[in-house]
Amino acid sequence: MTTNGLHSIDCDVHPTVPDIKALFPYLDEMWRESIETRGILSLESNAYPPNAPITARPEWRGPKGQAATSPAEIGRQVFDRWQASLAICNCLYGVQLVLNEDMARAFTRALNDWIAREWLDRDPRLRASIVVPMQNVDMAVEEIERCAPDRRFVQILVLAMQEAPLGRRQYWPIYAAAERHKLPLGIHAGSSYRHPVTGIGWPTYYVEDYAAQSQGFQTQLASLVSEGVFAKFPGLKAVLIESGVTWLPGFLWRFSKYWRGLRFEAPWVDRPPEEIVRDHVRLTLQPFDAPDAPDLVERAVEHLRCDDMLLYSSDFPHWQFDGDDVVPAGIPAGLRRKILVENPIATYARLKAEAPEEGAR
Amino acid sequence: MNMELKQPLRAAKSKYAIVDCDIHPRATIEDLRPYLSNHWQHYVQTYGMRSRHGFAKGYPYPKPTPLASRRDSWPPTGGPPMSDFNFAREQYLDFYGISCGIMNPLTPSGQGDQNSELSAALTFAVNEWQVEDWVRRDPRLKASVVVPYEDAQASVKEIERRAGDKNFAHVLLLSRTSEALGHRRYWPIYKAAVEAGLPIGVHVFGYSGWAMTGTGWPSFYLEEGIENAATSQTLVASLVMEGVFEEFRELKVVLIETGFGWVPSLGWRLDKHWNRMRDEVPHLKRPPSEYIREHFWVSTQPMEETEKPDQLIDVMKWIGFDRLLFASDYPHWDFDDPFLALPPALSEVQRRAIYGDNARAVYGLA
Amino acid sequence: MKKHVVAPVGEIPPGGRKLVTLDGRAVVVFNVAGEFFALNNRCPHRGGSLAQGHLTGLVEASAPGEYCYSRRGEIIRCPWHAWEFDLRTGRSWCDPQRLRARQYPVSVEPGAKLVEGTYKAETFPVTVENDYVVIEA
């Protein structure tokens, strides 16, 4: 069954940079030489240790242990097997961790160019997020302006943990640019490691680091709303990518409760936070933090009280589920078309612009 | 202001035999003097108490009301909220017919001070003061063993000093410690607590010394209030994943003022990722949510205000009606009135459990 | 609805307030620059006593960072959870459509009129020389 001629739009897949040298064609000579002379091996991030189970399902890993290093792999799994019509590439290569601003800009440009040439050019079903060098706000705006003319870029991408909470005004020129180009702000699990991943220090285990990401999303959502980002940029949407989802209702109850007494502190928040979030924020589906219990999954979805919020995603090649159960059992059948197609189309203006009209075929 | 407010005195005990797991008596430095050496009296006078932030007086995020307290809780005799025993007894304990109130003294307890020796001196003094000035005057009250948690050995000493003293209900820690509470440096505290037969109470706040979140410093107190829930998720995950409950099978942890709407989804998230990455934490023999179900209790305040009443009942059911402990947070501004806080949809049995039976079981109260 | 005489006007100066009981209901009356407003004392959120609340102004913002402070003394914040209520309308600021503190009409009547009429004086004898605050509840 299709909607608008589309079966589903996968809003979170991850091209993997196989080797730092893959970026060489997109780097100036000085940076190429710097990498070789200084022995900069890789920008892989501790957010996804390369061999950790969550980073890739074993059967998807190639001979070097990596997954999703070519469009063909996404083609086989995401398009052929899972029947998506389009997929949005969110590349997590750790360019946002780099501390030297100039190096960060060079790497980020190279990464976005690599995505455009070696992924988007090779499969017309692929779309992508513009990876943004958060190290320097002017550079971030420049990069958005540079990549935005390529309409296959449908979103801007930042990591869930930055130097400051994302709502802070220092970042606002980035949101102005995103709003101007009708690009949602994609916030993806992961950290730039300017701080330990929690406000109470560095966890011992990787599994704690990964689990802590949902708390990072809570902090960011509180910041974006409290600082008035959606008041200032009413056209901006935020997509929380790979967040876990089921933390949201509890978070909204607490936020709204405190807001009712503390409204005077941020008076530009002129309506309940849960309303603002339902208008401006979307969440990708995988991982969906719930046990394999359809009744409970259904109840958790009901607690969201918003049919427009969930966006289909597989999170390929991250290992979030087994087999082909991309959509957890228990997601109400009546919501499927919305999650698979309608909500993504409504969220991504550039997808909406290119989507055929319903019934036009 | 020319006004009168006559409260009807409700001297009778509430039929629910309410155990309030979170009330905040406040000491002044004068109150603590008898229990501090000359050196520490001088030190506090001269250098002050210094948490891991820059404000000599006050807090990084200003509270919405003075001392974060109910405006009607300032005693007419002068002094800050819940510094006057008689007024607190009248306004709170007697008015609501409370059967038992567990005291969790916060500032100026000395917990988390940059100078850990000062922490040790102040926490000792606060524990003495709780008993002398409060518990001794009213058998309904219980004290906490306030400990200088960043120094595990000093904390053990303080716990051992109080072990066996029925005036104390639990060992008090704060949520924002310099490392998450599952780290091994804190394990001697858990060992001592278990040996003393005391639960651990973890109350929100404190200053870890890091930025308040994993993504830096927010701007508003509003965000701090929300972040307390996120930090609590981190510390629960830490206690579970580090294997504290495999090492200390009898350890009980009471989460105080953390809220509880987040508990079920945290358990689900930890289970999912533990299931995938068990090989990283082979010391865990069971899913994280089972450890949470068996070792944690959570106070009801601040009561979740869900959009629909059935959502709140769902969450309580998922956590377990036996794991919820009533708390008022008197005299703070986001206080939950004992008579109005619990959702009407609860059955009598559930109500009774949350108001007092659960706490009596956890704390071994009569 | 009955009319209750609650105080001579001089007893509640501008910026002041008085808590009274009218047929068992606690009602707080405020004098805002010579105008009187009366609210049910019980905060509709969780029952805090508005009479012990903090009188403040209204903080608004047309945009983030642009604070606009007005109407000093016309907003009462509940002493417990700090919900704001507009003395003029009784409406809460966080949810003006659905949540409000119950308001009662207030008027100032000359003593001469009250002595002749059938109004119920709550707490003291009425004399013809003074003006009195009258609440309809």
Image (tube, rainbow, N blue to C red):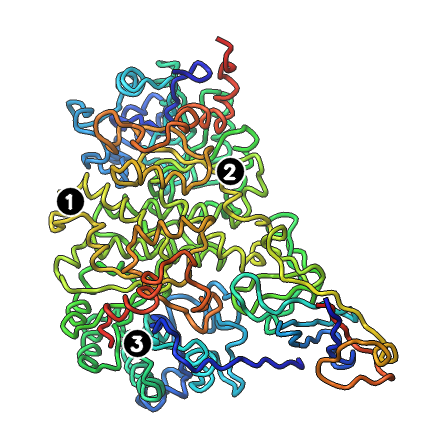
Amino acid on which disc 1 is placed: Glu
Q: Which residue is mark 2?
A: A280
Q: Are marks 1 and 3 on the same chain?
A: yes
Question: Which residue is the site of mark 3?
Answer: B119
Instruction: Check if mark 1's residue and mark 2's residue have beta carbons within 8 Å.
Output: no
Q: Answer with left or right where residue B202 lies relative to residue A169.
A: left
Mark 3 or mark 2, which is nearer to you?
Answer: 2
The residue indicated by pointer 1 is B280
**Which chain's residue wears label 2?**
A
**Relative image position of residue B89 (x, y in whole percent):** 43, 83
Horizontal side of residue B222 vs B195, given as left or right: right
From the image, state whether disc 1 or disc 3 is nearer to you: 1
Along the line of sight, the residue nearer the viewer: C55 or B218: C55
Q: Amino acid at mark 2?
A: His
Q: Are marks 1 and 3 in contact (CB under 8 Å)?
A: no
Instruction: Kindly identify the residue that appears in the image at 16 percent across and 72 percent down.
Output: B192
Callout 3 amino acid? Ser
Q: Position of residue B108 (x, y in %)?
A: 39, 77
